[in-house]
Image (tube, helix red, strand yellow):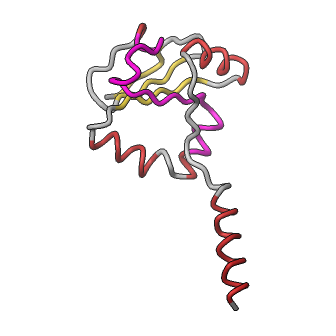
Amino acid sequence: MRRLTVLFCLSMVALGGFAQGVRFVGCSFDEAKALASREGKLIFVDVYTSWCGPCRRMSKDVFTDESVGSYFNAHYVCLQLDAEKECGHGFFGSYTPSAYPSFYWLTPEGELLDSRS
């Protein structure tokens, strides 16, 4: 019985590895644009801060959701940027958020399609 319980727990951990939310890439803005162009995707950018309650909730409850991840991973190259710690990121040379969280949808060339704060 103990062996069966251990086997069950291990299989649940293994299956849980397949359920994935939004995959955020850690790269420069230019690299994200090149990747989006190469993969035929748009770019999604989540700008957050560590002290922002709604930002933490999005990261915990929304971006980890499997269905949200399936959609975003199929259609977008996704960046998640801390507005305070990553203020030197190339994205902020073109865009300045007015509130947190801020979301941006961009073309592979980096042109703004839409944004929400």
Where is residue 107 drawn, in percent x and y?
A: 56, 16
Viewer-closest of 62 and 84 = 84
Specify the farthest residue to the top: 93
Q: In this figure, what is the number of numbered marks? A: 0
Q: Residue at x 61, y 15 (%)?
A: 33
Please state if 43 lies on the left or on the right of 117 as rendered: right
Can residue 32 be found in the magenta stretch? no
Magenta residue span: 69-92
Q: Is residue 13 above or below residue 86?
A: below
Where is residue 71 drawn, in percent x and y?
A: 59, 42
Where is residue 31 drawn, in percent x and y?
A: 62, 16
Specify the farthest residue to the bottom: 1
Q: Residue at x 70, y 70 (%)?
A: 11
Quadrant of the rendering where the C terminus is positioned: top left
Q: Residue at x 57, y 52 (%)?
A: 66
**Quarter of the image holding residue 17?**
bottom right
Q: Residue at x 37, y 17 (%)?
A: 87
Can residue 77 be found in the magenta stretch? yes
Where is residue 50 drawn, in percent x and y?
A: 32, 36
Viewer-closest of 68 and 80 = 80
Please state if 56 lies on the left or on the right of 111 as rendered: left
**Quarter of the image holding residue 12?**
bottom right
